Image: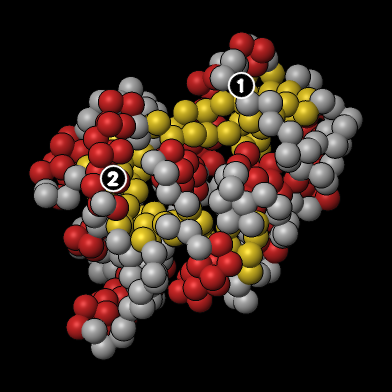
Amino acid sequence: MTSCDKPNFFSLESLLLITSSCYNIALNIRQSFYNAGIIASRTLSCKVISIGNITVGGTGKTPMTIYVVRLLQQLGYKVAVVSRGYKGSEENRGSIVSDGSKIFLGPDASGDEPFMMANMLKNVPVAVGQKRFDMGKKILKLYKPDVLVLDDAFQHRQLNRDMDLVLLDYSCPFGNKHLVPRGVLREPVSSLSRADAVIITRSNQKTNGYKSLFCRKAEKKLQPCPVFYSCHNPYVFQAVKKNSYSDQKKNTKSYDFTFLKGQKVVAFSGIACNGSFRQTVAEIGCIITEFLEFSDHYFYLEKDFNKISRISKKSDAKYLLTTQKDYMRIYNKVKWPVDLVVIGVEISFGKDEPGFISFIKNCLD
């Protein structure tokens, strides 16, 4: 199309623009109703911390939730977690996933992320449900936590919170700056005014912690809201021998990737940011013979397992690599023809950690 041509009103671009505009209008009406008190937010009798974002997936909310929960435990608080349970069968009804020691639901019912948190967080009850206030009341009655941590709840304004932590991905904080479906924003950038702190995640990838021009501008624009920088540090969560079923409870956590360097691997993932996992595998030093991408929260079928196995044999791969989140959906479903290595991710604040811990303590005190 030349500069003199008029855009087609019925083009895909025009349709996305119209849909995004309608979504923006509806969103503004909803936010104004909350701000004016026309729609009331409800309050629980404990401290509530929300961990969320303003984009569609991929900022590291679940590993950040795990980090914050463990930090709160170290500070002496009794903690519980409520997640939406996206794509789990209990999402609409709501249910207890774990009481902190025993897990009651599998990933199909709870969703992959709550199931992963229930496996990783000891002495921390985990619940799922769209109605966070109702599930919060239930978990308060059963377990009496001091602090309730909400996973992915920045847009969930039905429940008041004492602290809103909002995550932005270093490499692509706002996408193309358009709302969904034209872009990746769930809310306008101006909604960050509701945040108590902004955390820039994955500041180690491609940057080695260097603050980009965007980050420096963001810090000034967001003042007085504090901005912290975190990294995603990979580790080997588990290594499963070929021709054997894996066990999600067995944790062989290791930071030693020496055995993977220079080895042919087939990697696969079904997460919001598959490219990030591929980059991690490359930085480990693996030779990626094939990388298979699936949609976020994808529940694998037998044909997918067969395809992955077939490709691993054909490419003469030494290992199969996947993410810990994917592993939660497949751990007992297949015996692989080669060793499976599960890569986990943990959060590190580096030099920002003392400041972040002080911020959390001050807000709760």
Q: Quadrant of residue 337?
A: top right
Q: In which quarter of the image is residue 27?
A: bottom left
What residue is rendered at 43% in x and 38% in y? Answer: 74
Q: Nearer the viewer, mark 2 or mark 1?
A: 2
| Three-letter code, disc 1 | Ser
What residue is rendered at 25% in x and 43% in y? Answer: 359
In the rendered view, would you say 36 is above or below 306?
below
In the rendered view, would you say 127 is above or below 67?
below
Q: Name the residue under label 1.
A: 254
In the rendered view, would you say 294 is above or below 86?
above
* Farthest residue, direction bottom: 38
| Three-letter code, disc 2 | Lys
What residue is rendered at 15% in x and 37% in y? Answer: 216
Instruction: Please tell me whether mark 1 sits on a helix, a strand or a loop.
Output: loop
Query: What number is the disc on residue 361?
Result: 2
Q: Where is residue 181 in the image (x, y as percent from the top left)?
A: 40, 66
Instruction: Please tell me whether mark 2 sits on a helix, a strand or a loop.
Output: helix
What residue is rendered at 77% in x and 28% in y? Answer: 240
Whether residue 262 is visible here, answered yes or no, is yes
Q: Where is residue 339 in the image (x, y as percent from the top left)?
A: 78, 25
Crowd tier of the residue under label 2, counting other residues whose Cα lies within 10 Å: few below 14, some 14–19, many 20 or above: few
Crowd tier of the residue under label 1, counting other residues whose Cα lies within 10 Å: few below 14, some 14–19, many 20 or above: some
Q: Where is residue 340 in the image (x, y as percent from the top left)?
A: 75, 29
Q: In this view, does 107 lie to the left or right of 53?
A: right
Whether residue 310 is visible here, answered yes or no, is no
